[in-house]
Amino acid sequence: MLKAVILIGGPQKGTRFRPLSFEVPKPLFPVAGVAMLQHHIEACAKVPNMKEILLIGFYQPNEELNRFLFNAQQEFKISIRYLQEYAALGTGGGIYHFRDQIVSGSPEAFYVLNADVCSAFPLAEMLSFQKEHGEPNSFVILGTTANRKQSMNYGCIVENETTKEVLHYVEKPSTFVSDIINCGIYLFTPEIFQHIGAVFQKNQQDMLLYPYDGEEPTNGWHRAEAIRLEQDIFTALAGQGKLYVYKTLSFWSQIKSAGSAIYASRLYLNQYHTTHPERLATIKEGGA
Ligand code: GDD
């Protein structure tokens, strides 16, 4: 069976959404008529064998989020739970902290999705790709191509063109590295926790050796549990025969600002012609 984790961040993130995010937490901001997160949930619920969707973030549980989760569970007939981090643990720290919940029931693999992306979510394709590339426990990053200048705002991936292995991974480089960028959508097996665990142990040792003295630690955080998938895990895994990139030609964009939410709405509305024609306005009396 499979599971999915959606990283929703927390209140001090999403500041570029102000003032709109004062009214609604960013993951619930409507994009193409439904909450930003609903597109992710719908895509995950469609994958055969999907047993559970976990949202991980550091928002205080609130009524809006609870109501959204309740409605989504009813609509998609799947277990959806919110797990709250005690502090911002980063994109890798949160899943590591809740690893027991993720691996309970023994999923053979699980997806991790950034909440602030808009995508056709080719999740089933990523699974087939994983079975055909590398060893059975390989990890997959969804990638897309960007232009040279744009690429530097994202995680950049150098691939082996034949095997699709990730040879180099650089997060937001200051000079051009590659036009293949990280879409923030991953497929992992539970083995990823060994790699995150190793970084956790190393962080703990570093903290014993070099106690906090007011200087910025190398990872920018004062907590062994704060781990970034991108800089701390992918960069180290690149070239080790473990990490592969599945490049998609389907639509993808980031939702970082209110303006980019409009662009994302356009992409989803376009997709509604085939997936949800009922959500589109029709020409009728009293209609839009
Ligand atoms: N639970 C949790 N805890 N979620 C977090 C945390 C955290 O401490 N920090 C970030 N997130 C969530 C955010 O809410 C967002 O959905 C996602 O993780 C990534 O957020 P950022 O850390 O702001 O990264 P980014 O958006 O600048 O870049 C990431 O996404 C790009 C694609 O959109 C990177 O993965 C890039 O490599 C990638 O290209």
Image (spheres, helix red, strand yellow):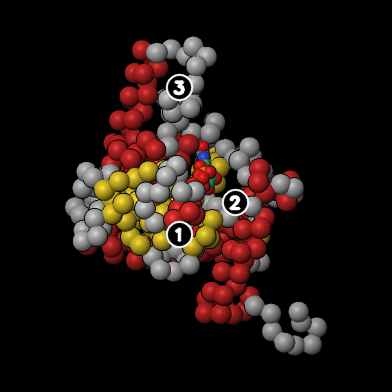
Residue closer to the observer: 145 or 211 = 145
Residue 143 point in image, percent of width and height: 38, 58
Please report whichever mark, 2 or 1, sits nearer to the chain's N-terminal start.
1
Please report whichever mark, 2 or 3, sits nearer to the chain's N-terminal start.
3
Rendered image quadrant of residue 267: bottom right
Please report whichever mark, 1 or 3, sits nearer to the chain's N-terminal start.
1
Residue closer to the observer: 101 or 255 = 255
Cα separation, mark 1 vs mark 3, equals: 33 Å
Residue at image location 44% in from the left, 59% down from the top: 146
Q: Amino acid at mark 3?
A: Pro
Residue at image location 66% in from the left, 43% down from the top: 15
Q: Image quadrant for the N terminus?
A: bottom left
Residue closer to the observer: 177 or 15 = 177
Residue at image location 33% in from the left, 24% down from the top: 202
Q: Does residue 60 show up?
A: no
Residue 183 point in image, percent of width and height: 44, 55
Cα separation, mark 2 vs mark 3, equals: 27 Å
Residue closer to the observer: 272 or 85 = 272
Mark 1 Cα-neighbour bin, 10 Å: few <14, some 14–19, many ≥20? few
Residue at image location 50% in from the left, 16% down from the top: 215
Q: Image quadrant for the C terminus?
A: bottom right
Residue at numbered disc 1: 147
Q: Does residue 236 show up?
A: yes
Q: Is residue 191 left or right of residue 32?
A: left
Mark 3 Cα-neighbour bin, 10 Å: few <14, some 14–19, many ≥20? some
Residues tagged 2 and 1 counted as in contact (Cβ below 8 A): no
Residue at numbered disc 2: 256
Mark nearest the camera among 1 and 3 is: 1
Tag of residue 217: 3
